[in-house]
Amino acid sequence: MARYFIYILCIFFPSTVFSGTFNTEFWLNSNASVLNNIPGYSQNENKMKNLNTNIFLSAGYSPVKNIYLDMLASAKQNYYYNEFDSNNSYKGFLHKGSVTLGNETAALTAGRIFYGEKNTLTPYFGLYDNFFGHTASSLNGFKADLNTGWVSLALLAGKENDDFTENSKSEIYGASLHFKPSQYFDINPFVYQLKDSDIDYFYTKIDRQILGAASNIYMGMGMNFYLSYAKNSGEDTYFSSYKFKNKGDAWLAKFNAETENKIFRYNLRFMYVRSSGEKFNSTNSTFKGINTYVYLGSIFSGTDMFWNSPYSRFTQHPFGNIDNITAYNLGATVAPKFTRFFKIDFDIYNISKTKMPYQQEDIGAEMDIALTLMPFKNVDLSLIYAVFYPGNAYKEAIPSTPGYEVNNIKQLAARLNIRF
């Protein structure tokens, strides 16, 4: 904690320590959500209500050339209610607190850091978009960056931080190489390792590797295609002696297009992800990510309704893990050219359980519609309506008890963002 105190001291009292470049940003994020028709007995209310508000402070300070201090902290209020339980809590977090030494060619960052991108097969540590109060995950460690212009290298070593990740003691190591031989495409091979031991009653040891590559193809006319492949190796140990080899692999493809006519601006997007594996001692070994975040809908990935339930095996944790998942997303954004006051987003998701060798079981489909109003600069309000349509695999995971109903799950939500 001593180093974080030094970071905060430098940020809030720069004139007493250094003189240099100082940048701050403050923003408020408030989310409200009501879920209706959660699976349950017909005589119950079967609703979940959430309200969480986060106040963020981001600050960066460069006392001298080639030294940069970075911090992101938040205070959070989180309230949830259902007919069996409710809670209102207040917490504070230091999400980032790091120092970077170097420049655009070579840099070393140490401390509590963010890393990665959403909707990829690589690890993601950063802020999350959801309706249950979870705000971020991070790494306590080091990141080194080397950049020559057309080729760059990033090295990573650290421990997962806070309760939102797979395990707060897990160690992560990784390397990512990025080539851009042409303005039309780039290539990004990567390798990551997750190590942990004495985790819980089931897992004794995790030794998991991910080896893969990704490529962006810039097609012109506002179009971009992204393709990634990753494969597991290593083995997890259960009950001290049972070894389970990680032999899964995964594909992820994304297409994005920006276009316009005289009246509207459009964004068209498509994403496909599939994780699979092979037979091992009569058990299906599926791809296992390392804190992978692939967003698959406001209900399926944006709430915790699957968490601690008979169907949590479809998500593993509420951040969009893709273990044993095949899914696609088709979406569009429409915004009028004559004003930047609002935009409309429409997305559909289809999610299946991957089954060996090449079959799927339908978990369900989701439709999301969002209207975002932007009445002032740095202020936006989103109104969301979502419906999750349960599939056969979802229904089979629910206890088949008389009077227990599984219906279409509906969500009404609102999100407010204000930045200063």
Image: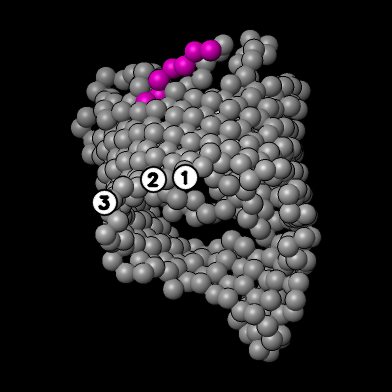
Q: Which residue is mark 1?
A: 222
Q: CA distance from mark 1 to mark 2?
A: 7 Å
Figure coloring: one colour
Say which label, 3 or 1, has the lower sequence index.
1
- Quick check: is 206 in the magenta stretch? no
Q: Amino acid at mark 2?
A: Thr
Query: Which quadrant is home to the C terminus?
Result: bottom left
Residue type at the position of mark 1: Gly
Seen from the viewer's position, the closer of residues 41 and 179 is 179
> What's the CA distance linking mark 3 and mark 1?
18 Å
Find the magenta span and give its range.
Answer: 358-364
Query: What is the distance, in whole Å, between disc 3 and disc 2 at their CAs?
Result: 11 Å
Could one spot residue 34 in this view of the protein?
no
Residue at far bottom of view:
16
Kind of residue indicated by mark 3 = Ile
Identify the residue at horizontal 34%, vertical 56% (top origin). Answer: 415
Which comes before the other along the chain, label 1 or label 2? Answer: 1
**Residue position marked by numbered label 3 in the rendering:** 263
Residue at figure coordinates x 51%, y 20% from the top left: 354
Give residue 269's position: percent from left, percent from top: 42, 38
Mark 2 nearby-residue class (10 Å; few <14, some 14–19, many ≥20): few
Which label is found at residue 7?
A: none
Q: Nearer the viewer, residue 324 or 150?
A: 150
At x 31%, y 47%, the residue is: 261
Locate the N terminus by quadrant.
bottom right
Q: Residue furthest left?
A: 43
Q: State the image quarter where residue 283 is shown.
A: top right
Q: Nearer the viewer, residue 203 or 98?
A: 98
